[in-house]
Image (tube, rainbow, N blue to C red):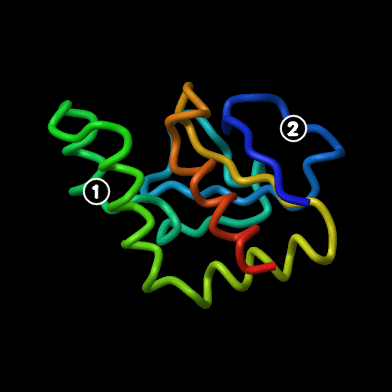
Amino acid sequence: MINTKRIYDPPEPSDGHRLLVMRRWPRGIKKTAVDGWNPDLGPSLALLREYRQGKLDWPTMAQRYRREMQGRREELAEVARLAREGNVTLLCSCQDEKRCHRTLLKELVEGLS
């Protein structure tokens, strides 16, 4: 099972494997707070910058992120493998889960199963 959560939310036993999926390490978070970190599963810095500057709307951001992830089949397959073995929680610092790449990433990985 794949879950999503903010990295700043407290860990719970039901999280299972906690995987950080951001390009940059979040402030104030210790390395021991996660089980793994794959920065390549986060949006490129250029894409993230354009979105945060308001140059892209959410549908365009989502479309471009999905396109970026087409080249990450091995990483996506690894997340799918972990999810078959137990719970996986995708972590990011975004406050709005509905407009966060971790939700898109969850959909992509679930589409592989």
What is the secondary structure assignment of the residue under circle 2?
Answer: loop
Label pair 2/1, CB-CB below 8 angstroms: no
The quarter of the picture where the C terminus appears is bottom right
Q: Residue at x 49, y 75 (%)?
A: 73
Mark 2 residue type: Pro
Q: Residue at x 62, y 68 (%)?
A: 112
Q: Nearer the viewer, residue 10 or 102?
A: 102
Q: Nearer the viewer, residue 113 or 18?
A: 113
Q: Is residue 38 left or right of residue 59?
A: right
- Give the x, y percent position of residue 43: 34, 50
Q: Earlier in the sequence, mark 2 or mark 1?
A: 2
Q: Residue at x 40, y 63 (%)?
A: 69
Q: Which residue was labeled with disc 2?
A: 11
Q: Residue at x 45, y 57 (%)?
A: 41
- Give the x, y percent position of residue 104: 49, 46
Is 81 situated above or below 34? below
Is 17 situated above or below 13? below
Is 29 situated above or below 106? above
Q: How many marks?
A: 2
Where is residue 13, by image quadrant? top right
Query: Which numbered disc covers residue 17?
Result: none
Q: Which residue was labeled with disc 1?
A: 45
Is 12 situated above or below 19? above
| Mark 2 residue crowding within 10 angstroms, few (<14) / some (14–19) / many (20+) | some
What is the secondary structure assignment of the residue under circle 1?
Answer: helix
Where is residue 101, by image quadrant? top left
Q: CA distance from mark 2 to mark 1?
A: 27 Å
Q: Nearer the viewer, residue 100 or 28?
A: 100
- Give the x, y percent position of residue 16: 80, 48
Mark 1 residue type: Leu
Mark 2 or 1: the one toward you? 1
Q: Is residue 76 left or right of residue 17?
A: left
